[in-house]
């Protein structure tokens, strides 16, 4: 006796055509014998519209339906946006940056500070060399 999940999985394989010839023949035999399996196949086929023999809609008509459905979505509505302005784009700063941080160190001032830091580290390294009397390099 197969469990319900096994029966549904097997019915899905049958409906989608994923079975080999031997499995398909057995499934077709079970359709005649097992009403639970038959019901599972019919339910899955109806869900997947296998029994729908209608001709597919032409591409242009289908595309119009898709665009109409997208247009009906709540986020696509334009109510109250008639007087909306385009978003503001900042092209340049009207004031110089202020405060503490990298954004405040622009132009020549930033270059001078970088050179000063490099010089301070170099002097600290040389002071360490002279105080120990030996090279710090391996």
Image: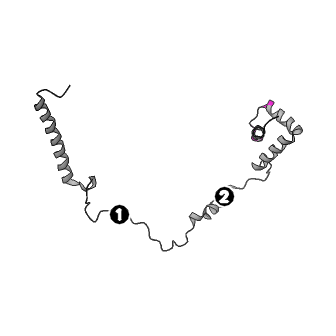
Structural crowding at the residue carrying mark 1, measured as other residues with C-alpha within 10 Å and reported as few (<14), some (14–19) or many (≥20): few
Q: Residue at x 23, y 54 (%)?
A: 106
In this rendering, the answer to whether 48 lies above or below 129 is below
The figure's colour scheme reads one colour
Disc 2 versus disc 1: distance between alpha carbons?
42 Å
Query: Can you say whether 31 is above or below 136 in the image?
Result: below
First in sequence: mark 2 or mark 1?
2
Residue 2 place in picture, x, y as percent: 80, 35
Q: Are marks 2 and 1 in contact (CB under 8 Å)?
A: no
Please give the name of the residue rendered at 39% of the width and 66% of the height, measured from the top-left corner: 88
Mark 2 surroundings within 10 Å by alpha-carbon count, few (fewer than 14), some (14 through 19), many (20 or more): few
Q: Does 33 lie within the magenta span?
A: no
Q: Residue furthest bottom?
A: 83
Tag 1's secondary structure? loop
Camera-side residue of 44 and 120? 120
Span of residues in magenta? 15-22
Disc 2, SS: helix
* Residue, far right: 33
Q: Nearer the viewer, residue 20 or 54?
A: 20
Q: Tally the marks.
A: 2
Is residue 44 or residue 124 the one in the foreground? Answer: 124
Against 135, is 53 above or below? Answer: below
Please give the label number shown on residue 104: none
In the displayed structure image, the side of residue 87 where residue 5 appears, left or right: right
Q: Which residue is mark 1?
A: 90
- Would you say residue 16 sits in the magenta stretch? yes
Image quarter hosting the C terminus: top left
x, y percent for residue 3: 78, 37
Q: Quadrant of residue 24?
A: top right
Which residue appears at 79% of the width and 49% of the height? 46
Per the image, the residue denoted by label 2 is 60
């Amino acid at each position: 006796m197969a469990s319900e999940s096994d029966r549904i999985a097997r019915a899905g394989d049958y409906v989608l055509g994923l079975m080999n010839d031997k499995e398909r023949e057995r499934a077709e035999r079970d359709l005649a014998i097992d009403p639970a399996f038959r019901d599972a196949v019919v339910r899955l086929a109806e869900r997947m519209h296998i029994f729908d023999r209608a001709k597919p809609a032409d591409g242009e008509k289908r595309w119009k339906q898709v665009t109409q459905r997208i247009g009906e979505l709540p986020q696509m509505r334009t109510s109250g946006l008639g007087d909306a302005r385009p978003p503001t784009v900042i092209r340049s700063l009207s004031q110089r940056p202020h405060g503490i941080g990298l954004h405040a160190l622009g132009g020549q001032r930033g270059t001078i500070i970088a050179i000063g830091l490099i010089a301070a580290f170099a002097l600290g390294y040389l002071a360490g060399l002279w105080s120990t009397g030996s090279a710090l390099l391996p």
